[in-house]
Image: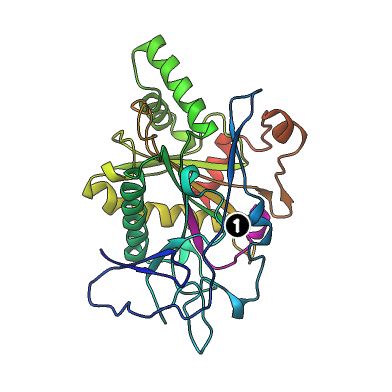
Amino acid sequence: MHRTVTELADGRELIYYDSEPGRDRGAEDPRPLDRVESTPELRRDPATGDWVTIAAHRQSRTYHPPADACPLCPSRDGRQSEIPAADYEVAVFENRFPSLAGGAGRCEVVCFTPEHDAGFADLTPERARLVLDAWTDRTAELSARPGVRQVYCFENRGAEIGVTLAHPHGQIYAFSTTTPRTAKHLAAASAHRARTGRNLFEDILAEARAATERVVLAGEHWTAFVPYAARWPYEVHLHPHRRVPDLTRLSEAERAEFPGLYLDLLRRFDRLFGLAAPTPYIAAWHQAPRTGGEELALHLELFTVRRTADKLKYTAGTEAGMDAFMNDVTPEAAARRLREVL
């Protein structure tokens, strides 16, 4: 991997990730942009202890632009975008409309490909590996910044999820706090250790691998399985067999195997419902916080809000109101369906 660091017209950082050195990344951003002025505010809910970010400036962010005005495509034919280069492999830049900024953290956009109508599942294994390397590099750099508590890499795909830019991309959030879901993981892992003397996530993986009816894919270094108490109709967790806290600690063998398994998994998701449109999903990397996360295990959670070809799973009364999920598909049936769609 080769990285080139540059700046956009308003001073935001832009990083090109290339598979080989020697690419010309000297194109400048000629847009007359003002410096980003964002003042997100962190407020703690006294009833739950959860941190909530108030980011009112995001009301004016780019919303469903036409394809010929996509800000994530390369700059071509006189049209300037967030990527000054006429082509790129993987590009990462500071979000122009960040939810987190300054002491509250940082938000970055990860462009997986210059192809507007592609998706992560369309990438080659080599390009998927380059994205993994970019995630890893950003995790290492952001984790080392003062005030950063946790780094979260994720992808939202599909209008049904709420995506406002159709170009294939993900995001990276550097939080100054521990996220509520990670806090639950920490509490559960601590209780499990006190009760059994073992690590919770190692036991979850071992149990899933033993209960083969919930395994979707398995390699030498990774296993993808539907969790025992899945919240979403089709939800898969992808774990390395060796427990590590974050992406920076993966071995070369684990990195080499990941792209093929992950691309296979995404392509199975796209075949689930027999639709011409790709399946909407969220792909979320769970990484341990900077300190105090020794019991946590790196893993990726992939799930879709679609439960049938013409029905969505909404987070309505019980889910949104009480955080009590009701699943319409048994985990065993979901795993069986994902194995069948090869």
- At horizontal 71% and vertical 49% (from top left) the residue drawn is 312
- At horizontal 47% and vertical 81% (from top left) the residue drawn is 30
236 is within the stretch colored magenta = no
Q: Is residue 49 left or right of residue 119?
A: right
Q: How is the image coloured?
A: rainbow
Percent position of residue 121, x then y = 47, 62
Q: Is residue 242 above or below residue 81?
A: above
The amino acid pointed to by label 1 is: Thr
**Looking at the rendering, which quadrant does residue 162 occupy?**
bottom right
Q: Residues within 10 Å of mark 1 (few under 14, many from 20)?
A: many
Q: Is residue 138 above or below residue 82?
A: above
Q: Is residue 303 left or right of residue 321?
A: left
Look at the image and tell me in which quarter the N terminus lies.
bottom left
Q: Secondary structure at mark 1?
A: loop
160 is within the stretch colored magenta = yes
Depth check, front residue: 136 or 314: 136
Q: Which residues are magenta?
A: 157-172
Disc 1: which residue: 279
